[in-house]
Image (spheres, rainbow, N blue to C red):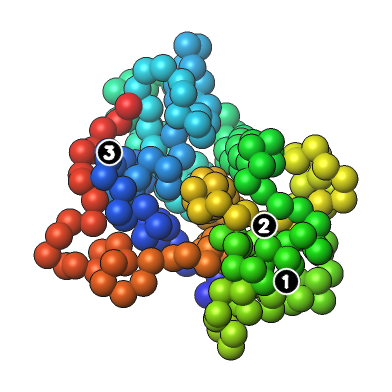
Amino acid sequence: MRSPRNETRSLNTRAHADIDGPVRKCILSQDRASPVALIRLALSPDGVILPDVRAKAPGRGAWIGVDRAELDVALAKGRLRGALSRAFKTSALTIPDDLPQLIESALERNALDRLGLEAKAGTLVTGSDRIETAARSGQLRALYHAADAREDGRRKLAQAWRVGSDREGSDLKGLALPVERTILSLALGRENVVHIALTDRHAAKRVSEALDRWLHFIGSESLSAPCGTAPQGASAPGSDPASPAVDVREEFE
């Protein structure tokens, strides 16, 4: 099995290949992707590099798409400083020693906040029985589990999803998140959240984007969001080699 710690990971761009919009370039790998797949770094007024995962800070930004292990190496060897100096056109900057941890914490918070917003909007379902009912009726678009969810509970919901989506015999299943039920419960404002499902495809896409970025950075081997509505066949992103996958308008801001 490939390990995210000993192999350079490519950006998870397939899910964003059909977006008609601006593209950013990772200052370390030079890979290009949609901003939703990358992490923006901003320069504070006092010259400190800080994560700006929601891309809201004013001024010029620098984008990275590497995982934490690669960032640790780039930081230790000075490659990150060089890349940032070129991106911000100044050497008068400070890189916190704990920048990788700051980024990881910000990505986790952003992903959990996204789940909380979907819970408030009513697009998210919790509770094993309610999720199983939605799954068997073909309403499920994504399925997630707390890290400490029981394996038999995961299997039961996965089977219900396969039945409801007419994909029995496939490997369709939910994704275990790297946080336990206590964290999920706090994020959603509900008690004992063990399983999470999304029934709206737009909500599933929003959650998938937030989670993919977080999981990619921490080196999770489960990068693909458990979405049951991925495009297939000729309609899949990039299926026509004659057409560009994205409208490349490369920017730093």
In the current view of this chain or complex, which residue is farthest to the front? 137
Label whose residue precedes the other's in the sequence (2 or 3): 3
In the image, what residue occupies the spot 31% across and 48% down? 19
Q: Is residue 55 left or right of residue 119?
A: left
Instruction: Please tell me which of labels 1 and 2 falls first in the chain.
Output: 1
Q: Residues within 10 Å of mark 3 (few under 14, many from 20)?
A: some
Residue 209 visible from this viewpoint: no
Q: Which residue is mark 3?
A: 22
Image x and y of residue 148, in percent: 82, 62
Q: Report how far apart the C-alphas of labels 1 and 3 lie in the structure.
A: 38 Å
* Residue 70 in picture, x, y percent from top left: 49, 53
Q: CA distance from mark 1 to mark 2?
A: 10 Å
Look at the image and tell me in which quarter the C terminus lies.
Answer: top left
Q: Is residue 123 above or below residue 171?
A: above
> What kind of residue is marked 3?
Pro
Which residue, given by chain and number where applicable, does mark 2 sit on? 197
Q: Secondary structure at mark 2?
A: strand
Discs 1, 2 touching: Cβ within 8 Å: yes
Q: Is residue 243 left or right of residue 189?
A: left
Taking depth in this image into account, of 200 and 251 the one nearest to the observer is 200
Which is more toward the observer, 181 or 218? 181
Mark earlier in primary sequence (1, 3)? 3
